[in-house]
Amino acid sequence: MFFPLHCPVCDSVVVRKKGLICPECISIPRLVEEPRCVCCSKHLQSREAIRCRDCSGLKRHFERGIALYEYASVHDSIHAFKNMGRADYAHFYGEEMRRELMPTIRGMKADALVPIPLHPGKLNKRGYNQAALLAGEISKGCGVPVREDILKRVRKTEAQKKMNHESRQNNMKKAFHMVKNDVKLKTIILVDDVFTTGSTLEAAAEELKRGGVEKVYFVALAIGKGL
Ligand SMILES: [Zn+2]
Ligand SMILES: [Zn+2]
């Protein structure tokens, strides 16, 4: 590899042999702390509950999932990763996910890793799907194959930042289409960069189940805080 790698926090060029993040930046990305929701893995404010408010109140189509970082601590990094061409951050993220999440991921006993697809127009513009890069990195650690041919984004969706839960769900309705399940995949891990309310992963999981998949888990790079 000849192109330079950048620190995912301060964006300065790093030397691969010395590590993929600068020593000064290493403590910035924060792992999600206990206690965590048993379903979506969000940090919980109170020790009393075992599920966050969203996971207690809503029907979840995925079984459960795991995320690596507190979103607030990597917000800018993920923005650059997705929107400013910093695809190379995937190397660092991948290394960290393999180190921290592998036992949990192996325990899911999945047949395939399926990245949340981008709409073709968006993919063309961006040149890569950040979720597919992450899935590739996870696959290196567990040997579960990445399948990008199973789920398609069939509808453009609006940015969801300012929407409430109901509008998010409506926004995501029929956003995905399962192409085929000719090899009879029973268990799938969906991979995405950020889990906020989970409406995107939810919609994808629902579509996979409709197509005959029995169990759907997720792995996300970062997740927000729960109540
Ligand atoms: Zn740095
Ligand atoms: Zn939850």
Image (cartoon, rainbow, N blue to C red):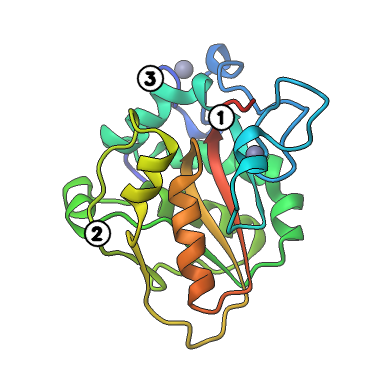
- Residue 29, how many percent across, how many down? 56, 22
The relative height of residue 185 versus residue 11 in the rendered view (above or below) is below
Amino acid carrying label 2: it is Arg
The answer to which of marks 1 and 3 sits earlier in the sequence is 3
Work out how far the residue at label 1 is from the one at label 2, CA to CA, in angstroms: 40 Å
Q: Which residue is mark 1?
A: 19
Q: Quadrant of the C terminus?
A: top right
Disc 3, SS:
loop
- Residue 156, how many percent across, how many down? 22, 53
Amino acid carrying label 1: it is Gly
- Which-is-in-front pick, marks 3 and 2? 2
Work out how far the residue at label 1 is from the one at label 3, CA to CA, in angstroms: 13 Å
The relative height of residue 158 versus residue 62 in the rendered view (above or below) is above
Disc 2, SS:
loop
Q: Is residue 107 left or right of residue 157?
A: right
Is the C-beta of the residue carrying label 3 under 8 Å from the nearest atom of ligand 1?
yes
The relative height of residue 115 versus residue 149 in the rendered view (above or below) is above
Farthest residue to the bottom: give it: 182
The answer to which of marks 3 and 2 sits earlier in the sequence is 3
Snapshot quadrant of residue 159: top left
Q: Which residue is mark 3?
A: 12
Q: Which residue is mark 2?
A: 155
Is the C-beta of the residue carrying label 1 under 8 Å from the nearest atom of ligand 1?
no
